[in-house]
Image (cartoon, grey):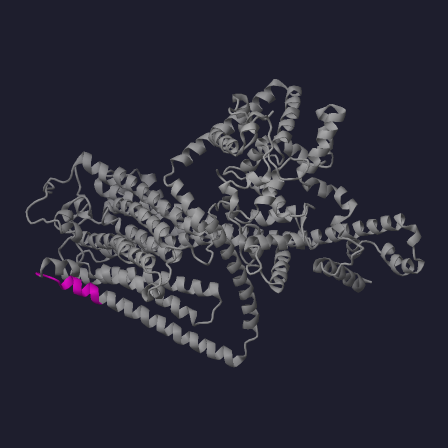
């Protein structure tokens, strides 16, 4: 099982290498960075959950508009509070690593963009997504009219089965045509 | 009936896609209970939900098999097989899930025979070794860290410029290796002809020669004239042939590499293009660059995206406005565009005349003070660089008056600039050709030509250097020291104009390709100057520039870069071909007495001698390959292959259309059934609220109606 004791065991390390897309150095670095976020008491406990707020202080996530969604998606917590164990953290880094496949990346991207977790990107999801992209404050947002026009354009293009929402396979269809996605869907410590 | 159906179908579609017009009591069809139980939804449902179910199950029944049954219960067909062949790390589940999956797999493996398990573990090991080797190789790539920083602050577009720059450095290093293997190496080992004097710095040589490319350099291995026929003098293995082979291989290899890069990029762009029009979705879904760490960069990125989206919406309304233009407006606009194009043409003409004038003046010089003569020598490169620096900005201004949409403006500027760059170089080459041998009939022509290319290459680099350290950097300093002064505000903030920078690179690479035949060490000079350029531009971008307001997409830009490179290469090949042909056509006028093809030999008779020495079947084969009789079948075969591809593409296109239609149909079926089920459930739950009249009105037509797709077929 996972541990956050100061050293990673050799078996554990090789297991992580097998189960994630990370290299040994990356796993060790991840472990170091994760341990830095822990308080003194927590360091001795195995399987500590880091609360979302502390994860978000990482510079790699701090300026990302989707940071909360990322934590929520990768968290295995029962309370859906976005707290991460070290293994969840590795999952996150693995999905965002250089060598993760398009399949994995697009799957997680879909889940990050699916704000209400209902399995499809509907009008509300797209609206929140666009707001995340343009900035949340009132003066940076698009006007309602612009938003409506934009979303109807998106749906017209990518909603192939015309049910008014973008589902996973339609989403992956779009993503698979965009060469830049793999290079920009990346978080490297 | 038919009409009614189609209407009904359309109504269904429009009702669903407008979305807003849904009453509150019938919730969205994808929020109903039964929707979650559909196999297609189960298959794509986030793993996490299943995960919970799964662990609970395992805990109760105490067996991994049961967990597997549940998790894969609905993915009856493909996914199960796929899940077992996929590497564990590519499964979309959390680490604990993967661990369980591995445990199950191990059970599976213990059931299968020894051979199979060995094979699997071998394949895993092999993949790991490959991955490690790939990782080690990518670590070897230089400037990885720099690129990462630049990407973090300026986004993918600027990074694409630097990646392109690095690619050109590699290309030039490869050329260097080839030049060494085919030209420099043999010359070093086998020596040169006996008549050639040893290379020595002295006499009338001065340091200025390194700028002029004359004197010492004229005799050095830098130029064509150095490589005379040495002791390596077999019929089919001698210095001239090796020289020719080396040059041809360099050009062919560049062609293959550049074409490959262009087509890879082109495929992507084409797929994103009008045909499948994924333009906006692509901007939204792939819009955020997750590599950004700097808060300032993040807010800039927000700004990019916002501007980009607004731009898109604006262009959309622009096309609407364009469609509404009256005839009079249209005529006036076309007249304006015509006049502006005339202005552009006259500017280009003026630029070309200036180059001509500079070439003539430079060739007349004799017996001036050294500084004057240096400037005169460099007059054509100075003119070309100056023209290339100034005119693109004028084109940018001009295109803003033409009332094109924004992207069209950028493209128009770019196309004009490309034309200017390549054409000015071409015109210059043409003037050298036509004026040269009239004035120096018995001088080594190739050396003189190589010298011009050498000067262009050196001056181009000097211009980059000066542009940064004498123009951009002081400007930045001025802005930092006196941000409120009039001059600083007038100059504004500096941006990294990627298209123009790329044009510079393409131009210098084209010069290198044109000149490589006459100046074989040009790739080496190119590699060194490009490396220096990398650091200079890094300094510019990190120190002097603010990120641009407009996004420049990585992929589409790289296609454009490589396409320009391809144009440059074609130009180089044309120049070389023309030059060789001219030598052959008028040998008495152009008799050169230097280099590998001295003493009345030309490219054609050296290869001819070699071919004649071959055995007869090889000779006939070669002659056949070079004849028109071979070209015809080749063209025919190409036409056949192309036709078959085009027709296959059309057939696929039709299949795609039909599949899309089927998808729409089946999804509307699904929606219909889910809704129907939901209403039936609701009716079952609230029997007291049954209003008979409402059912009478509402239900019968709907229940009796078959799903729309069934009726349509």
Q: Residue at the spot x=14%, y=40% of the render?
A: B193
- Which quadrant holds residue B438? bottom left
Q: Residue at the spot x=17%, y=41% of the render?
A: B229
- Towards the viewer: B599 or B293: B293
State whether residue A175 is above or below residue A41. Answer: below
How many labels, in total?
0
Q: Residue at the spot x=92%, y=55% of the render?
A: B690
Can residue B500 be seen here?
yes
Could you tell me which quadrant the N terminus of chain B lies in? Answer: bottom right
The percent coordinates of residue B515 (x first, y second) are 26, 51
Judged left or right of residue A189, residue A114 is right
Could you tell me which quadrant the C terminus of chain B lies in? Answer: bottom right
Judged left or right of residue B114, residue B353 is left
Q: Which residues are magenta?
A: B357-367
The percent coordinates of residue B590 (x first, y second) are 18, 56
B359 within the magenta span:
yes
State whether residue B30 is above or below residue B16. Answer: above
Q: Residue furthest left?
A: B203
Prevailing secondary structure of the magenta residues: helix
């Amino acid at each position: 099982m996972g541990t956050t004791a100061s050293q990673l065991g050799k078996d554990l390390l090789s297991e992580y290498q097998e189960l994630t897309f990370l290299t040994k150095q990356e796993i060790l670095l991840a472990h170091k960075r994760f341990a830095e976020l822990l308080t003194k008491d927590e360091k001795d406990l195995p399987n500590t959950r880091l609360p979302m707020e502390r994860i978000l202080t990482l510079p790699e996530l701090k300026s990302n508009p989707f940071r909360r969604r990322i934590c929520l998606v990768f968290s295995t917590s029962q309370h859906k509070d976005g707290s991460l164990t070290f293994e969840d953290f590795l999952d996150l880094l693995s999905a965002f690593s250089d060598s993760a496949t398009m399949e994995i990346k697009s799957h997680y991207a879909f889940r990050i963009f699916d704000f209400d977790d209902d399995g499809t990107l509907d009008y509300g999801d797209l609206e929140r997504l666009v707001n995340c992209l343009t900035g949340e404050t009132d003066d940076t947002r698009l006007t309602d009219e612009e938003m409506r026009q934009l979303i109807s354009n998106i749906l017209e293009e990518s909603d192939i089965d015309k049910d008014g929402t973008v589902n996973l396979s339609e989403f992956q269809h779009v993503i698979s045509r965009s060469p830049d996605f793999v290079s920009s869907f990346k978080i490297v410590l | 009936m038919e009409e009614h159906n189609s209407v009904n179908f359309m109504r269904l579609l429009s009702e669903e896609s407008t979305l807003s017009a849904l009453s509150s009591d019938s919730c969205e069809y994808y929020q109903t209970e039964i929707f979650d139980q559909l196999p297609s939804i189960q298959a794509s449902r986030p793993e996490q939900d299943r995960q919970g179910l799964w662990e609970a199950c395992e805990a109760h029944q105490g067996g991994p098999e049961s967990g597997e049954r549940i998790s894969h219960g609905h993915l009856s067909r493909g996914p199960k097989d796929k899940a077992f062949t996929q590497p564990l790390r590519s499964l979309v589940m959390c680490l604990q899930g993967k661990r369980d999956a591995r445990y199950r797999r191990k059970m599976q493996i213990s059931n299968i025979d020894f051979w199979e398990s060995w094979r699997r573990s071998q394949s895993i090991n092999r993949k790991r070794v490959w991955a490690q080797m790939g990782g080690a190789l990518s670590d070897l790539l230089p400037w990885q860290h720099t690129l990462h920083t630049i990407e973090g602050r300026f986004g993918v577009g600027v990074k694409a410029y630097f990646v392109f720059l690095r690619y050109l450095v590699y290309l030039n290093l490869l050329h260097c290796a080839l030049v060494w293997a085919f030209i420099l190496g043999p010359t070093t080992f086998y020596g040169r002809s006996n008549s050639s004097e040893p290379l020595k710095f002295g006499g009338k040589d001065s340091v200025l020669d390194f700028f002029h490319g004359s004197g010492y350099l004229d005799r050095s291995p830098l130029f064509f004239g150095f490589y005379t026929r040495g002791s390596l003098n077999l019929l089919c293995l001698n210095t001239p042939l090796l020289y020719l082979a080396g040059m041809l291989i360099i050009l062919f290899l560049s062609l293959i590499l550049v074409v490959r890069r262009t087509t890879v990029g082109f495929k992507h762009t084409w797929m994103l293009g009008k045909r499948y029009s994924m333009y906006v979705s692509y901007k939204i879904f792939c819009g955020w660059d997750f590599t950004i760490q700097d808060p300032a960069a993040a807010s800039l990125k927000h700004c990019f995206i916002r501007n980009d989206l607004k731009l898109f919406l604006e262009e959309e309304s622009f096309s609407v406005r364009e469609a509404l233009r009256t005839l009079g407006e249209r005529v006036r606009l076309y007249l304006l565009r015509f006049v502006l194009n005339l202005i552009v043409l006259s500017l280009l003409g003026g630029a070309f005349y200036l180059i001509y004038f500079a070439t003539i003046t430079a060739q007349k010089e004799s017996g001036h003070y050294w500084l004057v003569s240096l400037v005169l020598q460099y007059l054509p490169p100075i003119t070309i660089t100056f023209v290339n620096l100034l005119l693109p900005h004028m084109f940018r201004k001009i295109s803003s008056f033409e009332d094109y949409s924004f992207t069209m403006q950028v493209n128009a500027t770019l196309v004009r600039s490309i034309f200017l760059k390549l054409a000015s170089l071409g015109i210059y080459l043409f003037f050298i050709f036509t004026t040269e041998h009239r004035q120096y009939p018995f001088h080594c022509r190739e050396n003189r030509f190589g010298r011009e290319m050498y000067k262009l290459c050196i001056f181009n680099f000097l211009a980059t250097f000066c542009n940064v350290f004498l123009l951009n950097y002081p400007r930045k300093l001025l802005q930092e020291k006196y941000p409120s002064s009039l001059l600083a505000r007038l100059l504004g903030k500096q941006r990294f104009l990627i298209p123009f920078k790329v044009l510079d690179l393409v131009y210098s690479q084209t010069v290198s390709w044109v000149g490589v035949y006459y100046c074989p060490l040009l790739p080496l000079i190119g590699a060194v100057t490009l490396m220096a350029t990398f650091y200079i531009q890094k300094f510019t971008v990190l120190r002097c520039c603010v990120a641009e307001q407009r996004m420049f997409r990585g992929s589409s830009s790289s296609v454009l870069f490589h396409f320009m490179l391809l144009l440059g290469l074609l130009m180089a090949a044309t120049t070389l071909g023309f030059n060789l042909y001219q030598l052959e056509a008028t040998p008495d006028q152009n008799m050169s007495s230097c280099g590998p093809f001295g003493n009345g030999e030309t490219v054609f008779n050296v290869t001819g001698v070699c071919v004649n020495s071959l055995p007869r079947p090889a000779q006939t084969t070669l002659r056949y390959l070079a004849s028109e009789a071979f070209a015809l079948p080749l063209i025919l075969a190409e036409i056949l292959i192309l036709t078959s591809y085009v027709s296959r593409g059309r057939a696929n296109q039709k299949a795609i259309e039909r599949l899309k239609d089927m998808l729409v149909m089946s999804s509307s079926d699904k929606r219909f059934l889910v809704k129907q089920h939901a209403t039936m459930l609701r009716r079952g739950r609230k029997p007291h609220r049954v209003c008979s009249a409402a059912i009478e009105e509402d239900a019968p037509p709907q229940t009796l109606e078959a799903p729309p797709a069934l009726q349509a077929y």
